[in-house]
Amino acid sequence: MKDEVETNNAVYKTLLESTKAIPWKIDWKTMTFTYIGPQIETLLGWSRSSWVSVNDWAERMHPEDREKVVAFCVAQSQAGTDHEADYRALTAAGDYVWIRDVVHVIRHPDGEVEALIGFMFDISERKKAEEELIRLQKQLEEYSYKDGLTGVANRRMFDSVLDVEWANARRTHQPLSLILLDIDYFKQYNDHYGHIQGDDCLKSVGQLLTAAASRPRDLIGRFGGEEFVLILPETDGAAARQVAEHCRKLIHEQCIPHSNSDVASLLTISLGVGTIIPQQHDQPLAFIEAVDKLLYRAKQTGRNRVEAAQWGIEDAVEVRSTKPA
């Protein structure tokens, strides 16, 4: 019987040590390793003899993981609960390897913890795959909020940001400004220069407008077709008109030829600018429609110009028209 037990133990040990999983055992009373598989030397580079106590395990853990993982494992072990923990383990070469420890708690008949046994698994490749998946998910989310052609925010992003800034403006009683702009005679531009050059034109306009939306909370987006939009939080009417005029000049100074325009020989834009301190009864859609009417007025009264108005500010409505110099 004794020989059979020894034979079985030898077989089990051989099986354990032939796998990539690293078996180990810790005596709970002394907090020392009574066994650790030879695979640990291949994975981490530390000799088996260097794994004496749980301090060796804890000290070879990434500083960012150590406190949380050690506290979790101790608490679970004291409660007699089997558990798992992921962490970065330090190699003898100074690198880190992602480890998953799967722990089983052995208890005395009286319920006291006797020992911990478990396996260490190298999950570095799995972590790399998870991180790549997270990166791709973030990229996909970013793409879902970007206009595919110009790279600026799309309509979905515009709607989301406007909802947030509208609520902020209503709560803080700060002005919120919106600029809607349209490339003058863009259909004629496409007809004359072709759609490929038309796309390049839209990209250029998007990049130029991005430079005008300089503050962290400012948003430049493509509203649709050749229309763009800027959201300017905490921006009064005068400042918003300055931004709009800056946008108009940026496009004009780019000197993009537009021989079929009825306004100028260069590409131009028309802009509508609205500023509001939203009240309880005000709605974002009505505000957008009001600014769109200002854009329409700018186009109807000559194009290459800015039309601006503001609402809810000292109970006054101010309308201004800015013509190009």
Image (cartoon, grey):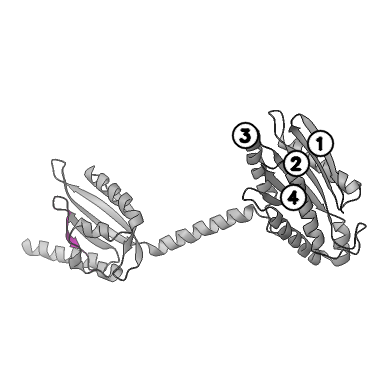
Mark sitting earlier along the chain (3/1): 3
Would residue 177 be seen by someone viewing this image from the given angle?
A: yes
Name the N-terminal-most of marks 3 and 4: 3
The span picked out in magenta is: 27-38
Residue on which disc 4 sits: 243
Label 2 neighbour load within 10 Å: few <14, some 14-19, many 20+: many
Q: Which of the marked residues, 4 or 1, is nearer the chain's N terminus?
A: 4
Crowdedness of circle 1 by 10 Å Cα count: few (<14), some, many (20+)? few
Structural distance between the alpha carbons of marks 3 and 4? 22 Å
At numbered mark 3, what does the secondary structure look like: helix, strand or loop?
Answer: helix
Q: Sequence order check: which comes first, mark 1 or mark 2?
A: 2
Q: Which residue is mark 1?
A: 318
Q: Which residue bears the numbered disc 3?
A: 172
The Cα–Cα distance between marks 2 and 3, rounded to whole angstroms, is 17 Å
Give the SS element for disc 1: strand
- Give the amino acid type for the residue marked by disc 2 in the picture: Gly
The kind of residue on which mark 3 rests is Thr
Numbered badge on residue 237: 2
- Image position, residue 22 (x, y; %): 26, 63
Q: Vertically, is 51 above or below 78? A: below
